[in-house]
Amino acid sequence: MTKAGSPPTDTIKPPLWVNAEITYKCPLHCVFCYNPLNYASTFEKELTTDEWLKALREARELFERDYLIAQINRFGGNISRTANFVGMERSALHRKLKSLGVVTSAKSGVRVAHVDDDAEA
């Protein structure tokens, strides 16, 4: 049961967005800014460039995987129509799906895309 005005939790799956706070070491103290004034004591350890790149790469892969799964399922598992819609060549889409661990299978006579459980293990 959900609260009034809130969307049902079973239809929303993370990630929906990424908010990346790169640094709090801004020397400006703008009136409208939400950065804390005592950032030096509050945020002593920031991520390195490599850690940021890794986090953004992982987020991109999650977004791509969920987007492509949604589009494949939208077109009933038809890879050609999906590739045309997302603006990729069919062979490039196949390679991308394989790298993301996405497979299509026939369930109840309809092709659907999902994450391969064996690929994640």
Image: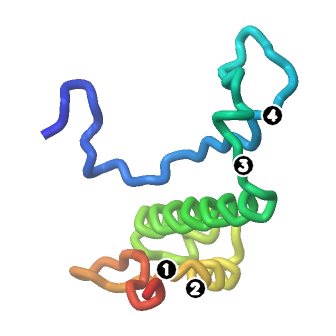
Give how far apart the Cα atoms at labels 3 and 2 are.
Answer: 34 Å
What residue type is disc 3 on? Glu
Query: Which label was assigned to residue 98?
Result: 2
Q: What residue does disc 4 label?
A: 25
Is there any visible trace of residue 85 in the rendered image?
Answer: no
The earlier-in-sequence mark between 1 and 4 is 4
Is there any visible trace of residue 8 in the rendered image?
Answer: yes
What residue type is disc 1 on? Val
The earlier-in-sequence mark between 2 and 4 is 4
Query: Which label was assigned to residue 102?
Result: 1
Tag nearer the camera, 2 or 4: 4
Q: Which residue lies furthest to the top in this view?
A: 31
Q: Quadrant of residue 41?
A: top right
Tag nearer the camera, 3 or 2: 3
Q: What element carries label 2?
A: helix
Q: Do tag 1 and tag 2 residues touch (Cβ < 8 Å)? A: yes
Give how far apart the Cα atoms at labels 2 and 4 are.
Answer: 40 Å
Rendered position, 2 above or below 12: above
Please state if 29 lies on the left or on the right of 60 as rendered: right
Q: Is mark 3 on a helix, strand or loop?
A: loop
Q: Do tag 3 and tag 4 residues touch (Cβ < 8 Å)? A: yes
Give how far apart the Cα atoms at labels 3 and 1 are.
Answer: 33 Å
What x and y, as percent, mark residue 113? 41, 75
Please state if 102 lies on the left or on the right of 88 as rendered: left
Q: What residue does disc 3 label?
A: 46
